[in-house]
Image (spheres, rainbow, N blue to C red):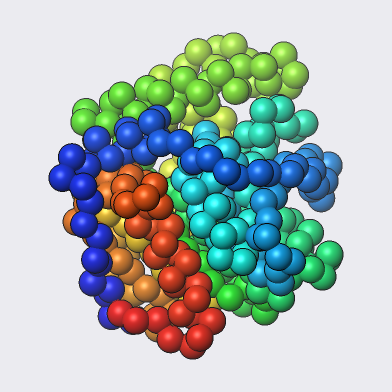
Amino acid sequence: MPIIQPTYKPPFWAKKSFTSTVFSGLARRVKGVVQTRERITLPDGDFLDLDWSYAEQKSNKVIVLLHGLEGNAQRPYITGTAKLFNENGIDACAVNFRGCSGEPNLLYRSYHSGATEDLEAVINSILEKNQYDEIYIKGISLGANMALKYVGERDDVPKEIKSVIAISTPCDLKGSCDALLSLKNRHYAIRFLKHLKDKLKPKLSQFPDNINIKDFNSIKTLIGFDEVYTSKAHGFKDALDYYEKASCLQFLPNIKVPSLIINALNDSFLSAECYPVKEAKHNPNLFLEMPKYGGHVGFIDKRNIYYNEWRALEFVNSINKGKFEV
């Protein structure tokens, strides 16, 4: 599918990647979203908390929202989309990954970029209730990689899933991790690592057979975290094995569900491999849009509705009509 020409024009003050990324992550506020929590039990005995918000009238459509690294269902990039879709007659199911809903999960494992088994459990739970004829999935950053991997790694995607939207997608996890560890992103990497280690620390006493204080203290970088914890807790040999097997890039050619990727060219979290031009050109179901600006999930636009949010709604509506303008 041809590459989509972006129309995004940010405010003059939001053209720098750092400004748009930080403002969107720390300063943005979204009001008026009322969420109701549902807890589902996973096949391995753990749980996920889903935060639902609803359209004014009963709907047969729902968008499943997947947050990024150390995010949750209350982040503005989630509630902003939920609000817009609710106002346009579509329910929203905002997923909190394991350990991200304000309560520690039960097992030693948690969540990671490629944990599509948890997304599958969410989809199955929704389908079992027979409430929705149409399901859309929108992922942000880590959640975007997960969403694309989910629809690309299987040939039996449920017929109810009509489209996927992936924002600021680290399609190649090793490349994205290397970018995060660069000097210009040092402040982001330190912040992410602190949150991850704070969440891991209680597991030292809960699961002493899995990790000890020496291993914990050896974690100095994000790659170190993935080497010591993420890979071992989730069945990978090491960090590189995790990056290789969990990256969505390899699954993009197999995607059969209309999928839109929006990755800003000035996103400092993404490496060159995270812009899958070749894959988009050879897969009629894959749409790639690369705005010049937007940073990492920082597509600031008018009336506090972000560019990626109204583009997601536009994509869903146009796919339902059988045509998406490129």
Q: Is residue 70 left or right of residue 252?
A: right
| Left or right: 18, with 37 as reference point | left
Vertical placement of residue 221 versus 77, above or below? above
Above or below for 238 versus 196: below
Q: Position of residue 72 (x, y in %)?
A: 57, 38
Point out residue 188 in the picture as x, y percentages from the top left corner: 34, 29
Is residue 137 visible in the rendered image? The answer is: no
- Against 274, residue 128 (above or below) is below
In-image side of 118 versus 191 (left or right): right
Vertical placement of 198 versus 116: above or below? Answer: above
Quarter placement of the C terminus: bottom left
Q: Position of residue 260 (x, y in %)?
A: 42, 68
Q: Residue at x 47, y 66 (%)?
A: 313
Residue 55 in the image, given as x and y percentages of width and height: 66, 60
Q: Is residue 38 visible?
A: yes
Q: Nearer the viewer, residue 60 or 49?
A: 60
Q: In the image as oriented, which residue stretches furthest toward the left?
A: 12
Say which residue appears at 71% left-offset and 76% top-offset. 133
> In the rendered image, which quarter is residue 16 located in?
top left
| Quadrant (top left, top right, bottom left, bottom right) of the N terminus | bottom left
Q: Quadrant of residue 14?
A: top left
How many marks on residues? 0
Identified at 21% across, 57% down, the residue is: 9
- Quadrant in the rendering for residue 51: top right
Task: Identify the residue shown where x is 56% and y is 53%.
Answer: 82
